[in-house]
Each structure stands twice: as structure tokens, then as C-alpha cells.
């Protein structure tokens, strides 16, 4: 998979890709993440990527020209499955969207900023808008990192134990069951006996029951999808 992330603040998004699972996924050649500084695509002397809104009002607006220049140059090199704009107004990101995106080959993530983007970018240059939740971040970089992380970890070979992504919370619209490690007894706080029984069928049944109970308690709406 190839992911191009377009941002006017590249430093804000570099670190999540320079460590741990996302770094390893890149060194194994399973994904290429390319962070692109939008300022390199402006023709203005001061390399600005935003301007005042026509009609007035508070807040700067991201200009269409640098974005168009950048996307045009990227599209000359490869065909993109999706050109995603991160914005609080977009479709709500969830696990099923992450699953679908993990099957794609080439993605662009355009990080929103300031008061928003010139509407013509939304009309003509992107294929979808994604929000990571009903709250407003100071920019789309963290949202792009969240989306890329959730997608990349699903690519086969990225996680060492291939089944572990499948047993994540939400993968079957259930919250994951509790997990424990040594010691079996910590200051009298004991691990459930079934987990020490060695009876794998019993353990799986217990885990499933715990998942159902947790989901019902914490996220009852998920159970309707289950
Ligand atoms: N940019 C600002 N807030 C955002 C959000 N909640 N999701 C995606 N992009 C954003």
C-alpha cells in the first residue's frame, strides 16, 4: 500500500510513523508512507497555503491552488483509490471503514486546517471526507495519523500474530474481553481461574461471554450491529 499525506505542518505527523508497528510496516515494505509539505506546491512568494474568506468572517481558508498542484503531480505518478480529506464534517470513521481502506492500494490523506478548505477542493479534488469523531481538533494531522494507523495495522503481515487484528475490539462489533498476565495473584487480586485451567474451549466460551457482557454494559448500540 502507498499512502501520501498532504499537510502544511509535516512535523506534526512525522513521529507516529517513525516508531514501533508503523515503522516496522514500512521497513518490511508492506506500506510506504510519504509525508508531503503542501507549502512546496504554492506559487506565492511567502509560501502561504491559506487566505482570507471571501465575504469576510473569522478564520483563514486553505487555498485550492497548492492543493490542486500537489494532487495533480501525485496523480501523474499513480492512480488513487481514494483522496480523503480529514474534517469534522466527514463520515464518521469506524472499524469497518478501516477494514475497507486496508484493501486499497493507493490513498491520499489531505489534512484540513484553519477554518476549512476552499469548497471547490471538496467539490472537485477529493473523493471522500472522513471525521474521526464529533469534536474539533486544531488540524487534520492527528486525524490522518489515526486513520493511517488503524488501516496499516490491518495489512497482512504488519502484525506479527496475524490473528491479533481479527480479535481486536469492534472487529465483530464486540468489545474485546479482559486480558491478564503474570502474576496470577497480585496482592490478593486474582486472575479468573478459568484462564489458568488449560481448557481452551472453556476459555474461549468465557471470553465470548465477557465480550458480550462488556459490550452490553459499555456500548449497547454495538450489540444491535453484532
Ligand atoms: N479536523 C479537525 N477535527 C477533525 C476531526 N474530528 N476529524 C477529522 N479531521 C478533523
Image (cartoon, rainbow, N blue to C red):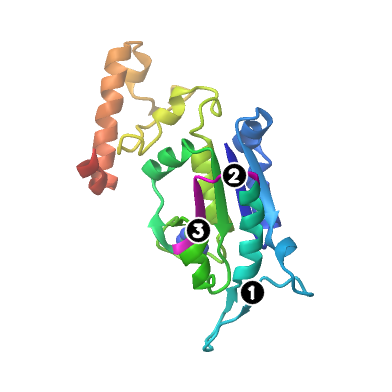
Q: Is residue 97 left or right of residue 50?
A: left
- Residue holding disc 3: 126
Q: Residue furthest left?
A: 224
Q: Residues within 10 Å of mark 1 (few under 14, many from 20)?
A: many
Residue located 56% across and 50% down the image = 108
Which element carries disc 3, helix, strand or loop? loop
- Image coordinates for residue 23, horizontal then vertical, percent: 66, 36
> Could you tell me residue 176's position as x and y percent?
36, 34
Question: Quick check: can you spot residue 209?
Answer: yes
Point out the residue furthest to the front here.
Answer: 76
Disc 2/disc 1 C-alpha distance (Å): 24 Å
22 w.r.t. 158: above or below = below
For this rendering, which residue is in front, 217 or 47?
Answer: 47
Mark 2: few, some, or many residues within 10 Å (few <14, many ≥20)? many
In the image, is the residue at mark 3 within 8 Å of ligand 1 by its beta carbon? no
Q: Secondary structure at mark 2?
A: strand
Residue with the mark numbered 2: 3
Please tell me how crowded label 3 is: few (under 14), some (14-19), or many (20+) other residues with Cα within 10 Å: some
Q: Is there any visible trace of residue 188 in the rendered image?
A: no
The outermost residue toward the right is 45
Q: In percent of the image, x 28 and y 14: which residue is there?
A: 201
Query: Which residue has dot 1 on it?
Result: 50
Question: Residue 222 lies in what quarter of the image?
Answer: top left
Q: Residue at x 72, y 67 (%)?
A: 42
Mark with earlier residue (2, 1): 2
Amino acid at each position: 500500500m502507498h499512502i501520501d499525506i498532504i499537510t502544511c505542518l509535516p512535523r506534526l505527523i512525522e513521529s507516529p510513523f517513525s516508531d514501533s508497528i508503523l515503522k516496522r510496516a514500512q521497513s518490511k515494505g508492506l506500506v510506504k508512507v510519504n509525508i508531503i509539505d503542501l507549502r512546496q506546491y504554492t506559487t506565492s512568494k511567502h509560501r502561504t497555503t491559506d487566505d482570507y474568506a471571501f465575504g469576510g468572517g473569522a478564520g483563514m481558508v486553505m487555498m485550492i491552488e497548492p492543493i490542486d498542484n500537489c494532487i495533480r503531480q501525485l496523480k501523474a505518478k499513480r492512480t488513487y483509490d481514494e483522496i480523503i480529506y480529514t474534517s469534522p464534517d466527514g463520515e464518521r470513521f469506524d472499524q469497518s471503514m478501516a477494514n475497507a481502506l486496508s484493501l486499497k492500494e493507493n490513498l491520499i490523506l489531505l489534512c484540513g486546517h484553519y477554518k476549512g478548505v476552499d469548497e471547490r477542493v471538496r467539490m472537485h479534488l477529493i473523493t471522500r471526507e472522513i471525521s474521526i469523531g464529533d469534536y474539533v481538533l486544531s488540524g487534520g494531522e492527528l486525524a490522518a495519523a489515526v486513520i493511517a494507523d488503524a488501516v496499516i495495522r490491518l495489512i497482512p503481515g504488519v502484525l506479527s500474530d496475524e490473528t491479533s487484528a481479527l480479535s481486536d475490539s469492534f472487529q465483530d462489533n464486540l468489545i474485546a474481553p479482559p486480558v491478564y498476565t503474570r502474576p496470577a495473584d497480585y496482592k490478593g487480586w486474582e486472575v479468573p481461574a478459568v484462564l489458568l485451567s488449560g481448557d481452551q474451549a472453556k476459555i474461549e466460551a468465557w471470553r465470548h461471554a465477557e465480550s458480550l457482557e462488556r459490550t452490553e454494559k459499555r456500548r449497547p448500540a454495538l450489540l444491535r450491529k453484532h
